[in-house]
Amino acid sequence: MFESSTRPRLRRNLRFSIVDGGCFSSMVGIGETYLSAFVLAVAGSQVASGLVTTIPQLAGALLQMVTPRGVALLNSHRRWVISCVTVQALSFVPLAIAAIVGNIPTVVIFALAAIYWAGGMAAGSAWNTWMGRVIAPTLRANFFAIRTRVMQACTLAGVLAGGLILEIGEKHGHPITIYAALFLAACVMRLISSRMLVGMSEPKVSEAAHRIMPLREVMSHFLSKDGRLLVYILCVQFGQQIAAPYFNPFLLKEAAFGYWEYTLLLSAAFIGRSLSSPAWGRFARRLGTQRLLAVGGLGIIPLAAMWIVSSSFWYLLALQLVAGACWAAFDLATMLLYLETIDADERTSVLTGMNLFNAFAYVSGSLLGGGLLWALGGDRSAYFAVFILSTAIRLGTILLLVRLPRYRLAPVPIASDPVAVRPSAGSINQADLASLPDVIEPPK
């Protein structure tokens, strides 16, 4: 694909975009992944360790709403993305300093995490629009497939490297200061990513090609076309987040796993998701996206309760693999279903709105789970109560699943990038809307 192109600028854009994706994913794997563990190590709060993975996302989702104005102010998607990416990279510097000092107020960690997510989310929607102009439609499917595989490999490498560094640091008596190495490495990776973006071109295209929808119009879009689907997805996310943020402190404190075992469990869910995704894509093409949603929606229901069965490392390792595969099916199905009603010129705004809705579900669920964990004393039985409640809410979503309308959708290939690594789910993925064709025709 690369050699056949006769345009040096295009070849450079493709190369730089792949390096950008790899460095971004390395940052996610070695940096953001271990922020929850860092909060537990420096503050000792199990609830804060869970909430740091959700509340900052809401702040980021709210701050990303300034993206249209930021792009207009700079008169460039490229300049806006580079600015946001640089801010995201620098958010790790105070964390590294805090790790060296060995102390930092929890509220400051949350603020820095909010800056991290704000930079990433604000860059994401504008990046999709920019890449949609840079990468020709005929190249998108193959290019983004390659880019996604590189990003998955780099994310996994970052997670494993981070766990190994933490394990070595703990054995040598530096359980907190060693986090500085992770955060500085994450900062460097994102700065390299920023440098790659600087080297890419930006075509001059009329802004009319990408209409900015007000949030009220985005919400009206969902409620009028996909109201039941949106409610179902948000209820599932709410139920998941009651338990999901607290798998990290459960593994590190209650189950008392070392950093390396913890890392392998994180990696297992990510591997399960990554390996199963191509198969789920084929499933959707052959049997339909609606059936894929049913498989994923039903498969994720018992996952939280299954953590109660055993704390054996090997049992949890197998459970993580299965969980990653189930969440891969659910996430792919919901994204494909949404694409049926997203016009090309509205994708940036709709993606921004989806991020915001999901962030509200994440925070509300995690606050409920954290409140229950705190009220019950934070011991093993408290964790089990949180896991059972999460499963009960997910079980209730069956009523919403069976009431969804029948969609007539011809699945299209879509790439998605891991923006965070989480136990059970494997990762939080963001769709590369730039990987889609400019027009998605409904089936005849």
Image (cartoon, rainbow, N blue to C red):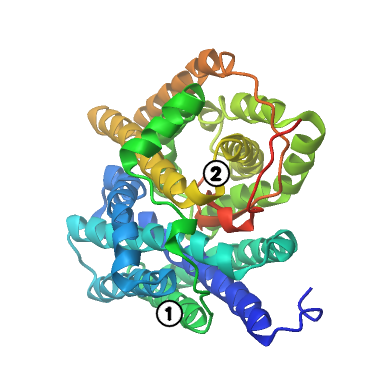
Q: Nearer the viewer, residue 39 or 324?
A: 324
Of mark 2 and mark 1, the one earlier in the sequence is: 1
Q: Nearer the viewer, residue 194 or 150?
A: 194
**Quadrant, the N terminus:** bottom right
**Quadrant, the C terminus:** top right
Looking at the image, is 338 positioned above or below residue 396?
below
Q: Look at label 2 and name its amino acid.
A: Asp
Looking at the image, is 313 positioned above or below residue 196?
above
In the figure, residue 285 lies in which quadrant?
top right
- Residue 247 percent coordinates (x, y): 44, 42
Q: Residue at x 62, y 24 (%)?
A: 298
- Residue 128 percent coordinates (x, y): 51, 60
Q: Look at label 1 and name its amino acid.
A: Leu
Looking at the image, is 357 positioned above or below residue 433?
above
Q: Nearer the viewer, residue 395 or 290?
A: 290
Q: Secondary structure at mark 2?
A: loop
Q: Residue at x 34, y 58 (%)?
A: 68
375 with respect to 379 (left or right): left
Q: Residue at x 65, y 75 (%)?
A: 14
Q: Residue at x 49, y 72 (%)?
A: 165
Residue 109: which numbered mark, if any? none
Residue 343: which numbered mark, if any? 2
In the figure, residue 71 lies in which quadrant?
bottom left
* Visible residue check, residue 38: no
Most extreme residue toward the bottom is 8
Within-10-Å neighbours for mark 1: few <14, some 14–19, many 20+: many
Judging by the rendered image, the residue that carries numbered circle 1 is 191
Q: Nearer the viewer, residue 138 or 3?
A: 138
